[in-house]
Amino acid sequence: MSDLPRSPLAPDHFPPMLAVPGVEMGAVAAGLKYKGRPDLLMMTFAEGTRAAGVFTKSKMPAAPVDWSKHALEASQSLVRGLVVNAGNANAFTGEKGLRAARKTAAIAAGVLNCEPDQILLASTGVIGEPLDVTGFKKYLPRINGGLSANMWRDAAKAITTTDTFIKGASRVVEVGGRQVALSAIAKGSGMIAPDMATMLGFLFTNAPLTASCLHRLLQQGAEKSFNCVTVDGDTSTNDTLYAFATGGAFSQDLIDDPEDPRLENFKKAFFAVLIDLAQQLVRDGEGATKFVTLRVEGAVDEQSAKKIALTVANSPLVKTAIAGEDPNWGRIVMAVGRAGEPADRDKLAIWIGGEEVAQNGLVSPRYCEETAAEHMKTAEIDIRIHVGVGKASATVWTCDLTHGYISINADYRS
Amino acid sequence: MSDLPRSPLAPDHFPPMLAVPGVEMGAVAAGLKYKGRPDLLMMTFAEGTRAAGVFTKSKMPAAPVDWSKHALEASQSLVRGLVVNAGNANAFTGEKGLRAARKTAAIAAGVLNCEPDQILLASTGVIGEPLDVTGFKKYLPRINGGLSANMWRDAAKAITTTDTFIKGASRVVEVGGRQVALSAIAKGSGMIAPDMATMLGFLFTNAPLTASCLHRLLQQGAEKSFNCVTVDGDTSTNDTLYAFATGGAFSQDLIDDPEDPRLENFKKAFFAVLIDLAQQLVRDGEGATKFVTLRVEGAVDEQSAKKIALTVANSPLVKTAIAGEDPNWGRIVMAVGRAGEPADRDKLAIWIGGEEVAQNGLVSPRYCEETAAEHMKTAEIDIRIHVGVGKASATVWTCDLTHGYISINADYRS
C-alpha cells in the first residue's frame, strides 16, 4: 500500500466478500521490500480446480509470467496453489529470475503436496532487482499453517504496491439450480492500460466449469473490463488475470460451453465482478481526482469504437482538460481525429454530462457552456461521442491527468 | 506567443536567415484572438514556384487542410501565395469554415492577381470557433503593400500560439554549381507527435526542383524530422508542412529525380533544416526541462526501431522519471515491451548518457547508478537501447513530462 492518502474516488469501504468453497488463503509480511505489512500471499485450491490466465502482451514478460504460462499448460490447467509477492516484479532478471520462479513453485508444491506445475505465480513491484526467495521456505509453511477461507482483506492487501486502497468484489449467483460464489481481488493504480498493464486480478468461483470454458469467459471478460480501462496508457511486464473454478461441491458434470443457458446469470455476474475491479483500478489511478466514463457510439464496429474511446481516454490534452474542469471539447475532436478510425467529421456529436455540446460537426446551437462546466466540477464525468458512421459502441473508463500523477512518478522511485 | 517564460531548452537566439529569391512576406496584427502581435501572415511566390504539402493524418482535418489539398491538386502545385493565421484553427467549423477558407483564398488571389487555387492556407489556434475573415479584405492588401524578402522574425512570430520562442533555420548549399538558399520557419509546442501534430512548418528554397521531386523530398524529410519528435503523443486537426521551390533564378532544367547526384548536398541541407526545426519544437515542448535523444538499435527494420523508440518516448512513466532525474531503466524495459515489436528480452541492453545500464537482459555488472544519475541532472539526456534482434536503428527526440505540462494544459484554456 502507498503512503499516499486514500484516493478521493475510492469506494466507501472494502465490500463484504463471500468465501468460495475449495479456496483458502493466507498472507505474511516477508519483508521483500515493504516493512510491517503482508507482502506474500498464498492461495490454495481443492483438488480438481481449473484455472485460466490472461497475461501481459509485453515483449518483456517477467519470469512469473513465463513460469505460469508453462505451468498452466503442463498441469492441463489443474492447479492447487497461487503464490504472489509484492515489492519485487522479478522482471528483467534473466535466468536467475526464472530459477527464483521455479524455486517458489517447488517450495509451494512441497508444502501443498502437489506438482510444481500446479502452482501459479504472480509478482509485482520493482523491475530489474533479483528476487530472493530463500525466505519462502520458512514463510510458505507458516502461511499453510494458518489458512482461512475468509482472509480477503489480508489477501487483497498483500498484493498491493502503490495502491491507496484494497480492491475486491463479490457476487452470489445461481448455476443449474445451485448458488455459487464469485469473489475476486485485484491490485493496480498506475501503468494501467489495455492489454493488461500493471495489474493483478484473481477471480475465484465454485461454479462447475471446464478449463476451456473458464478460459473463454476470462478472455471475454478481460475485453469488457481490464482492457477497457486506462490510466496512463502504459503496460507492464507482469500483468496477470487469473480465474479459478473449484467446482468441487457439484456432483453434476462440468459445463464446457460458455453459451450454455445455465451460465446466463453466471456470465453476467462474472463480467460484473471484473468490471467492478477494473473500475476500482481507475478510481485508484495515480493522482486521479475524476472518474471518467467515456462512451463512443456510431462506429463501424465494436473494435473501432473501443479504439476511438481509448484514444480519447489516453489523450494527455483531454485528461489535463478534465483535471482543469474545462469542457474543452475541441480536444475531444482532436483525439477522435487522431484515432485514425472511420468517423465522419461533419456528423460528429459530443455530449458532456448529458449536455449536447456538438452536433453535425459543429458546436450545438443549444450548447450551454455553463451547464457543461458545472458537470466538469463533479467527480464522476460522463462523455459521450457519436462518430456518425455506423451502429457499434464501446464504453471505457479513465481518470484525469493531474499534478498528483507527476508528483507520484517524478518525485518518487516506485 | 505564450506569456510563459522562454523555454529553458530554447536556442540562444533566432538564427540568421537567408532571403530566398522569389519569396516575399509580411505580417500584421489582425486581432483574430491575440492583441498587439502579428497573427496574420502572407507569403508570396514568384511565378513558376512549385509547392508540396504533407498534412495531418487526423480524421477531423481543419477547413484550411481540406482547402489546401484541393488547391495543390487544382493548381498542379504551381502556387503564388500562402496565408496563415494564428489564434483560430478554423477546425470543426463545418460548411461555414470551408467558406471562410475559400474566401481567404479568393481575397489573396485578388491581391496577388492569380487564381484562388494558387493560394495555400494554414490555421492554428482554438478549435470549433467560427473564423471571421471579413477583415482580411483590409489586411491582405495592407500586407501586400509592405512585402519584404527578409521579415523572417515577423513571419515566424505571426504563426505562433503557445510557443515560448520563435523558430527558424536556414542553410546555403550548392546545386549544379550554383548556390541556393534554404530557409524555413515553424511553430508548435504541445500536441506534438508523429503524424504531424499541432505544428506548422514552411520551407522555402530557390533550388530548381519539379513539384514531384519536392514532394518526395518533403515526405522523406518529414519521416526523418517531424515524424520523429513527440511531446505528448497528441496530433492536431491542422498540422501542415509545406515546401516551396521558386527555382526562378535558374536557367537550367528542373531536377525531377530526388536521387539526382546534383542534389546530394541539397538533400542533406534540406533534411538538416527540417530536423533542426523539429528539434526546436521539442525544445519548446509544454513544460519541458529536458531534451531527450532516444536511439534504438538492433531492431528488425527501421520502422520497428522507430515504433519502439516512439513508444518509449511517449511513455508517461519514462517521461516523468526523466523529469524526476531518476535513471529508472525498469520503466524503459516496460516501454520497450509495450511497443509490441520484435525484441529479445534476454539480449536487451540500455545505456544512459553513455553509461552501460543493462546488458543481456540484466542489470550490467559495471553499472554505476551515480554516473547515470549525474547524467540525468543535465538538460540534454541521451538514452540508447539495443533490442538484440537485428541491425536497424532509429533516433527520435522528446522531452520530459513535468508539472509545467499539467499547469499549462489543465489551468489555462489554450
Image: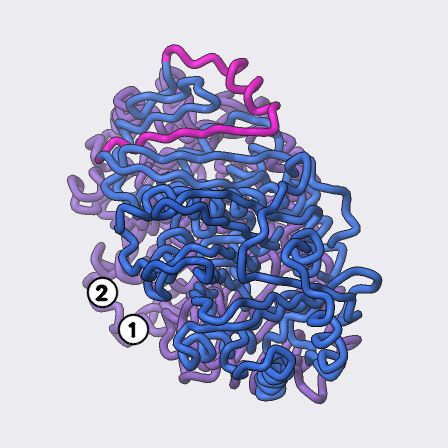
Chain colours: A purple, B blue
Q: Quick check: A324 left or right of A244?
A: right
Q: Residue at x 56, y 35 (%)?
A: B291
Dot label at residue A67: none
In terms of secondary structure, where does tag 2 sit? loop
Q: Residues within 10 Å of mark 1 (few under 14, many from 20)?
A: some
Quarter of the image with the C terminus of chain B is bottom right
Q: Report how far apart the C-alphas of labels 1 and 2 lie in the structure.
A: 9 Å
Q: Chain of mark 2?
A: A
Query: Magenta residues?
Result: B365-390
**Residue that protrudes farthest toward the front in the picture:** B251
Q: Quick check: B367 left or right of B65?
A: left
Which of A59 and A117 lies nearest the eye of the viewer?
A: A59
Q: Residues within 10 Å of mark 2 (few under 14, many from 20)?
A: many
Q: Residue at x 43, y 60 (%)?
A: B247
Residue B271, percent from left and from top = 42, 46
Q: Chain of mark 1?
A: A
Q: Disc 1 designates what residue?
A: A262
Residue type indicated by callout 2: Ile
Residue A371, percent from left and from top = 77, 77
Residues flagged by tags 1 and 2 on a common chain:
yes
Residue type indicated by callout 1: Arg
Q: Disc 2 designates what residue?
A: A255
Q: Residue at x 60, y 34 (%)?
A: B290
Residue B220, percent from left and from top = 36, 53
Contact, mark 1 vs mark 2 (Cβ under 8 Å): yes
In terms of secondary structure, where does tag 1 sit? helix
Residue A345, percent from left and from top = 51, 80
Residue A133 drawn above or below residue A163: above
Quarter of the image with the N terminus of chain B is bottom right
